[in-house]
Image: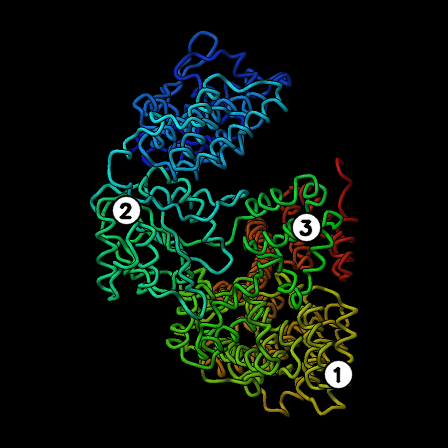
Amino acid sequence: MSEPELWLSVLGPVRARRNGAEVDLGSPQQRLVLAALLLARGRVVGHDLLLDAVWGDRRPRTALSTLRTYVSRLRAALGADAIVSAGHGYALDSATSDLAAMERLAQEGRYGEALALWQGEPLAGLEGAYAQAQRAHLAERRLTLLERRICEDVEQGRHAEAVAELTPLCAEHPTRERLAGLLMLALYRSGRQAEAIGVFTDTRELLAGELGLDPSADLVRLHQRIITADPELGAGPQDDRAPATPVPRQLPADTADFTGRQAHIEQVTRTLLAADGSALVVAAVAGAGGMGKTALAVHVAHGLADAYPDGRLFMDLQGAGPRPLAPEAVLGAFLRALGVDSASLPDDPGERAALYRSTLAERRVLVVLDNAASTAQVRPLLPGAAGCAVLVTSRARLTGLSGAHHVDLEVMPPDEAMELLVKVVGEPRVAAEREAAYDLMRACGHLPLAIRIVASRLAARPGWSLARMRDRMADERRRLAELRVDDLAVEATFALGYDQLDEAHASAFRLLAAPNGPDLPVAVAAAVLDMDEAEAEELCEALVNVSLLESPAPGRYRHHDLLKIFARCRLDEESRRVAMDRMLGYFLTNMAEIFGMMYPGAPLLDTVRVTGKGPAFADLEAGLEWGTAEEYGMLCCLNQIAETPGSALYDAVSLIDMMTDVFDFESDTTVYERVVGRTIEAASARGDLAAEVYARRKRGEILHARRAIEAAVEEGMAVRVAGRAGGLALHHAYAVNLLAMIAHERREYDEAAAMYHESIEVWRSLGHRSEEAVVLGNLALVLSEAGSHEEAVEVAETAVGISRDLGEGRPHPQIVYQYGVALGAAGRHDDALDRFEECLAEFRRLKQHTWVGLALRRIAEIHLRAGLPDSAVERAEEALAMLSEVAQVWARGRVLALLGRALIELGRAARGRACLSEALEILERQRLPDAHDVRALLAELPPSGA
């Protein structure tokens, strides 16, 4: 039955679809209003009834206005004319709803089609006395229709099928005499007279014991006719014809607490109900082991009984194991279930498949093929009849199934995972430890099998807290062992797939689990596997096809969390070290290429390990784009290198060194400080002096960047001593430069200049002109502030000249920045502005936000010196906006001080004072000497309001 343009549903969750697309109906209360209008079947529903439906006896003071808001929103969602105001109430045309369709089909005697409209519990998710009462009413209506449909089955001779369906129904509704009578009649007509009499006896005793009633006269009369074997009682269509064709009902029992997957259920159901006689319908559900594919398939198939009245075949094809079932064996089992005598089964597989198709030619049968190994296994099991349908599940996506509708099953959303836990463990226990419950779901990776195992273990141990179970699973090394109960085990489920891999794919599966990052681009995967990208991508895609890897985006791969643990349990320490070393080598190679473009001639380029397997970036922008995308992955790699015995720690610090110079790491120094700290601990524990000195030098530079000056000095002094004593001249020179910068910031100009000269001499002795240029630029800044302006400009020009030579005519922007500072201090404002605009453009190209802010501040400073306070304010505001995105509070303090001065010159004294006050607070907190200048300026200002 095709849906109209707008289709409303209450026989399940309250929903609306327009042209097949879901319509957002808002909050549960708003959906309850819609449900109440729909259930009125076009009649006007008064305000009072609607208010009672939504709030019961706990109406808020604003209930009526809120109700009107709900109706207004529903009109916006459904159409302005959907809900009509009438007197003191509203009415809704319910003709295009599942409720109206169900009643229409029931009146026409099409009970099976009417029942197929139910999509779970009516009004699901809506709370309150009204919703509960309506649910009970609709459940009773469904049961009545079910009785009528089963009665038709019995009258048409489908006695065995009726017995199978009535048995659990009678157990669920033991006092419902209509069901008991149908079961008695079906059993009698199946030749099971004694059982039919037993049903009457059980029902009579139950009615007397629980309700104090006797059976109805109709049930007693039926009992007498069965006892006396009334000949007319057995009359029916099948008595006067050949034996009925068997109707197989092979589905396993549905999962009683099946949870969630509503979108997937609707997708598969819609596909399987689309069989219109023109072509065979196939729905193929794929997903990793433990995703709940079988449970979903069985659940959907149970709901389609009426759509496929000639039976439902089911077979576990054992495709995940070492010996999948042969198609001809499955065909034999299916044919026998369909009534074909074993002696009539052909031995030839092709002939057997042809007989199978012929047998199904005039029937509507649903075939459920669970756990398929391949398209080749499934293809002979497809009926030829267009009225049949096939639901197949597999770990690998069966792309070779022509015309199949594919559904990929992934982990459960967090809310559905929690709902499943609640159903098994109970709401009170989960509510009492909500945070521990979420932690447990995360530890399970939201994998349905893992959640069910954990929930079952908790249900069997009411004395256990959820926190205890969470703590038991906290250790990855024992997590899989915890995920086992009875015959269910996550590890065994994973092993079924893993054991089918050849060595190349098994090795790739293990090695790719070594890195800790969230996912791996194919280039990193190729490095870890030590092969070219095309070969690596082929291996990864093959693992994706069998659901042992996921591909969250084209060219990126990852393990599910539990599969990663499973793979790591099968990876020895040496293989893990090799995998991480390859990954580190890949990142070093790529970063060295970028670093070389930004800092040509840098001494680091002489020592960094390059594998030669990195990409050749078209230009610096392409390299920076790659680096920005992979920065987090590199940090994860570095953390892991520090934890891996035997790893190359000095190489790891080289990567940190390049990253802090290439990226705008000053925006957030925390992650870099953490990773370098772990590296220092590892180097110290292993006695790797060179790596430890290098890492302590980097920590000093990082501490200086976040203005932890005393700690930075401590690291600089330690590296200065260790570098000189240990023959590590390069690190000695860097440490001296760091200490000189700190002395400069403290306005200890003579000491700073002396240390810069010491550092310059070391760099000249080592022949590293690039670092000589950097330190010369730093020296120029000291000379400028000390008042030696001409010397400062001369030194800065020397630095720019060296940098220009090394950069093939393009000097480094930081050295250009230093030159601009020297020019500005010397009063050459136009030249200074040119240099600042030059370096500003380059900083923006390099995405170095901190330096962009610093350059804008210097431009504002030049404007203020040149008597242009309005331009100074404009550029200072730009600098503040840029620096608000980074963690350099000290720089923000200096910009605020400049902005305050410019505002005061413009006559905006109140705002200027506020900026200076905020700057003073920041600069005092950062212990910068600039605070003294700002304090003095504030003291010179007239009092507020004067």
Number of marks present in the image shown? 3
SS label for mark 1? helix
User: Can residue 16 be seen in this snapshot?
Assistant: yes
Coordinates of residue 480 in the picture (x, y in percent) = 62, 64
**CB under 8 Å between callouts 2 and 3?**
no
Between label 2 and label 3, give the one nearer the viewer.
2
Earlier-in-chain disc, 1 versus 3: 3
The residue type indicated by label 1 comes to Arg
Earlier-in-chain disc, 2 versus 3: 2
In three-dimensional space, the C-alpha distance between marks 1 and 3, rounded to whole angstroms, equals 59 Å
On residue 388, the disc is: 2
Q: Is residue 889 left or right of residue 529?
A: right
Residue holding disc 3: 458
Earlier-in-chain disc, 1 versus 2: 2
What's the residue at 48%, 30% (across, down)?
A: 122
What's the residue at 78%, 85% (across, down)?
A: 721
SS label for mark 3? helix
What quarter of the picture does the N terminus occupy? top left
Coordinates of residue 145 in the picture (x, y in percent) = 40, 26
Q: Is residue 203 left or right of residue 922?
A: left
On residue 880, the disc is: none
Q: Residues within 10 Å of mark 3 (few under 14, many from 20)?
A: many
On residue 720, the disc is: 1
Between label 1 and label 2, give the one nearer the viewer.
2
The residue type indicated by label 2 comes to Cys
